[in-house]
Amino acid sequence: MNAIIAGIFSIALYSVSATLIAKETYNAATPKRTPLYLAWAAAGLHSLYAALIFSQRRYFNFGFFNTASLMALLVALLLLIAVLNKPVEKLGVIVFPLAAAMLGLDMLYPEELHVVSTHNWQMNTHILSSITAFSLLNIAALQAILLAIQNRQLRSHQPKRLIASLPPLQAMESLLFQMILLGLFFLSISLITGFLFIEDLFAQHLVHKTVLSIIAWLIFTGLLFGRIRYGWRGQTAVHWTLAGFVLLLLAYFGSKLVLELILNKV
């Protein structure tokens, strides 16, 4: 199959899936499996698109939109896996359109720079663990936002349809901390492999990423410690989660945005 065709169908299926989930939420209908089947198909085609592009170029391209598309794909897949044992499919209203948008931008603005084809397993481990960590903590941040809204509306006794359709607060918090724990695990691998295998970790364009990633690691570690030691939850968990994710967002995409899209530098 042609990569462009796979990408177009993937965007269409992501969009239809998100629309059906939103419609079910608005009508307070019983969730059906069809939107999830469509989302699985969309993620499969998204993966096929990435594989076909790689087969054409014979290298991985980690430019801004390429990386954003890959991370959006991983976030979508992680959400679909989570749905297998937790009723969190409503997050697809946010995740699936985001994946469609990132894939569309990747298709519209293909980049020929930032080649990654000759890295050894050490560097591949660093790169893949970084992407996995960001994707997991991305879902945790979305969970935290919904958790904050859910908590506020339940206190006011006027929950909106989307919030009323979400799982109980306890289930939402459970998934939040599961995602944070997994994300922290991969972030730790990313930092360890970075320190071990990158020759100059504090080189130009890497120093801010390194520092911000370490601070984010400390924040997420502190949150998990507070959860175990002091039973932190609710707004405290939300604030710490969002603070850590914002730092990672700046670390992973801050310099890419400025250097690649604004200054047009490698």
Image (cartoon, rainbow, N blue to C red):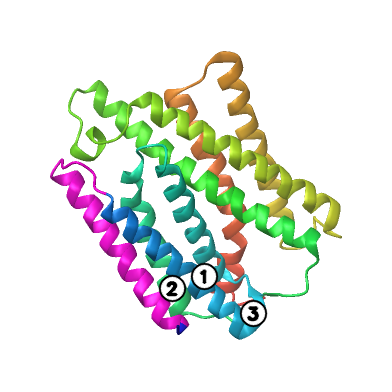
**Quadrant showing the C terminus:** bottom right
Q: Which mark is first along the chain, 3 or 2?
A: 2
Image coordinates for residue 253, horizontal then vertical, percent: 57, 59
Quarter of the view holding residue 258: bottom right
Identify residue type, mark 3. Leu
> How many numbered markers are drawn?
3
**Image point 29% across, 35% down: which residue?**
166
Q: Which mark is first along the chain, 2 or 1?
A: 1
**Can you tell which mark lies on residue 65?**
1
Marks 1 and 2 sit apart, C-alpha to C-alpha, by 6 Å
Q: Which residues are magenta?
A: 3-32
Residue 61 visible at all: yes
| Residue 217 belongs to the span the image colors magenta | no
Residue designated by label 3: 113
**Can you tell which mark lies on residue 105?**
2
Image coordinates for residue 19, horizontal then vertical, percent: 23, 58
